[in-house]
Image: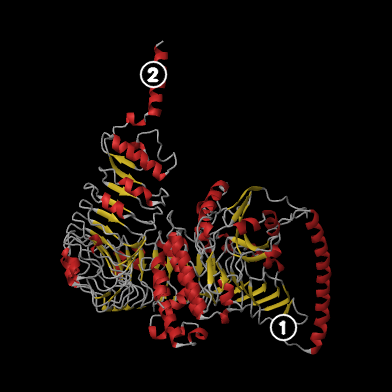
Amino acid sequence: MTRYVQQRTSLFLSFLFLLFPSVFSQLSSNQANTMMNLSKLLNLSDSLWVATKDPCSWKGVNCSSGNSSVTGLFLSVFGLSNSNFLPAVCNIETLQALDLSNNRLGSISDEFINDCGRIDGLKLLNFSKNLLSGPLPAFNVFVGLEYLDLSFNSLSGNVSLQVDGFPALKSLNLSSNNFTGPIPVNLRKSLMLEELQLSMNSFQGTVPQEIANYQNLSLIDLSANNLEGSVPTRIGNLAKLRILLLSDNKLSGEIPANISNIPTLYRFAANQNKFGGTIPSGITRYLSFLDLSYNSLRGPIPTDLLSGSNLQLVDLSYNLLEGSLPAKVSESLIRLRLGSNRLNGSIPPSFGTLDNLTYLELDNNSLTNEIPHQLSSCRRLALLNLAQNDLTGPVPAPLGNLGNLQVLKLQLNNLSGDIPLEITQLQLLSTLNISWNSLTGSIPSSISNLQRLAHLNLQGNNLRGPIPATINSMNSLLEVQLGQNQLSGTIPMMPVKLQIALNLSTNLFQGAIPETLSRLTDLEILDLSNNNLSGEIPESLTEMESLNQLILSNNQLSGVIPDFKHYVSLNASGNSRLINNTATSTPQESPKKRRSVVVPVVVAVVAAFLAVGIVSIIVLSFSRRFLKVNDQQSQSGENLPSPQVIQGNLLTTNGIHRSSIDFTNAMEVAADPLNIELKTRFSTYYKATMPSGANYFVKKLNWSDKIFQLGSHNKFGQELEVLGKLSNSNVMTPLAYVLTVDSAYLFYEYAEKGTLFDVLHGKLGDTLDWASRYSIAVGVAQGLTFLHGCSSGPILLLDLSSRNILLKSLKEPLVGDIELHKVIDPTKSTGSLSTVAGSVGYIPPEYAYTMRVTMAGNVYSFGVVLLELLTGKPAVSEGTELAKWVLRNSTQQDRWDGILDFNISRTSPAVRSHMHAVLKIALSCVSVSTEARPKMKTVLRMILNAR
């Protein structure tokens, strides 16, 4: 009986709770009703706000102790797009914090500002990462507000009296908008201000003297604007300042010396400006982080600059500094970047005492003498870059003791002697570059100990002997550069994971081109030119799916050139006995007697091919009529079963596309290799003509590759549904998809002009004028800015290159492969994570040791695309990356004309001046330092302002 009564009581209470949910809430009836009304206006899913539960238990709702009142609404990433609920929020008179960040709100109504402004207890208001546009609303009644964040929106206009009504304001963040005019300093009532963040806007004028009136300031961020003039010395009076960021402006004059008097200042960044003069002594007395890179600072480095007891990071790269390196260095130093200056003298042995040093970059200077063996004592060193100096002597064997070393760059010096065996003990090494020195001896067979090595570059030395056969066991290798040595013997079997390039040019290799090279299905560039190779070009090389450049010139090859895919750039000149299979004679002039023998042979060969071809066409037509055709045939000749479709869906709401797309037709098209339009690292594009006559791209992704997320079809389908809703005229968004067991097929609008690479470097290269190139640059920048600014989080591109940019017309680009960031799973890759780094020439330098795809990395890749448009050169030519070539030749601005595509720049002085302005932007994008690269939003603004 007792148990029965308990059950009845429980059921009754449950019934009461369903009818009267507020019975169990201690909220006032007004607040309970307000929350219920707010729930209806927001129309959230039941999983977020369940109407049968106490509102204090809803996701994103904070209440006071005892749940007597609502104190905070934290609705970040709730997918909110309609602002009609905002006035209802203001009925919560106990509200202290309102966080609406990471949504899609387009406006803030005056009603909201007037009503919520009267809530004295409201301390935090966060509208960051929305779609707010127009001028800044006038916040003039928020007497208790302490934190206002409107960053990452599209607000514009001047900032003046709109932020003058905050007597309690401690933090104002307006960064990443489109504000113009002077820096706002008329915050007369905001004397409590501690943080002022105005970065990534278009503020103009100078850094105002009045900024020093706010004595409580601990953070000032004015970076990425258009500020000019000098920095006011009064900033040195801000005794509580901890962070001062002035990067990416047009500031000039000298670095203010009195900031060294601020005992709390631990980070000062003024990189990417026009500062001149010398670096003031004592500036690092209290600092932990100093970045003055990309300026015009001159003179010697102060002897005390590197000795600050708290100093952890110093970046003075890309200046005009002279003299020797300071010998006194702080033991707390973690990263030191002094590259691209005019420093000379020796590397001080005292650098060897830096136990915490992780990155040491002294490249592109005029340092002399030998590399000090004391550097081997920096046991935490992960990156050592001494490239492009005048260093002499051997590569120090003790460097083999640097067990944490991942990147070793010693190229473009005068180093001599053998490659020390000790270097092959560096188990974590991923990049080894000792190219363009005077090394002798042979490549040690123990190099195979470097099982994590991804980039091997020993070209431009005097190395002799064969390539060790053990190289085949180096399964992480992505790039091998051994050109311009005196290596001999035959070409050994290479690691199957090679992707970026295999360069064996200008050596003494003999024998035939090995058939085993066809195993390198991911390889993009194969250069075997200028050797003594003989025999025929193996037909199997045509099966290298990712190959786009094959250089076989100046050998002794013979026979018929195989039929490579149309997107493969082949150079086989200088082989007099090679026969082009599209002709009936050799490409070289030859004696009549020889021609008389060759012609009949060729005719017979062609006739045989034609006969076989006709029979093959008949058989193929028959098989297509009665059988399903797949991409590949089994070895037995039996047809493989049709792809097992798991799901397919139309994503577009466009009626024309929905009626035109025919899934059956598309699957048949994608089964025929003859329909391939282009191939990228991760995708194959087919041209599909639908029964309606409309053309589409059908892009195939191969699920069987282990870097793709196996078994995640449902998740990928959901991601595609989201991507299909994106709308930007410069982004390729999927129209539909079909998922099979081992592949994914995505449908896109057809781009008539093909890829930017083909247009720029192919037959149309000469006709692509500057107006078209500039329009393409703007379009790609707009597409990338859109992707990086998506409200649900940035969409990163894993392989941004001119081959992944398609053209609707010569002025309308489309950024492709946007879905890969949702497909690739690096943790599943059996090889190096650099598998997903992108194409050679576009991979940001930091990827070698961070192994992360980032927005800054995308900016670097975009910078390379800009350089292609400016120079007319591909991202890699003759083994040299375009970005490195440009950086090396752009140190003096009066030589910039030699960088530009002369056929374009010569058309008019106005065009040349415009190209100079865009070149400056490109140089900032391909900066070695990730911190020095502007955000895409800033890049777009700079390109538009470069007119």
User: Where is residue 154, by image quadrant?
Assistant: bottom left
Packing grade of label 2 (10 A; few <14, some 14-19, many >=20) is: few
Mark 1 — residue? 587
Split into 4 quadrants, where in the image is the C terminus? bottom left
Residue 597 rendering spot, x and y as whole percentages: 82, 83
On the image, which quarter does residue 30 sit in?
top left
| Amino acid bearing label 1 | Pro
Depth check, front residue: 238 or 831: 238
For the residue pair 322 and 797, the one nearer the viewer reads as: 797
Q: Is residue 414 above or below residue 655?
A: below
Q: Residue 2, can we see it? A: yes
Horizontal side of 281 relative to 133 (left or right) equals left
Q: Position of residue 680 (x, y in %)?
A: 58, 64
Q: Position of residue 897 (x, y in %)?
A: 44, 85
To which residue does mark 2 refer? 9
SS state under label 2: helix
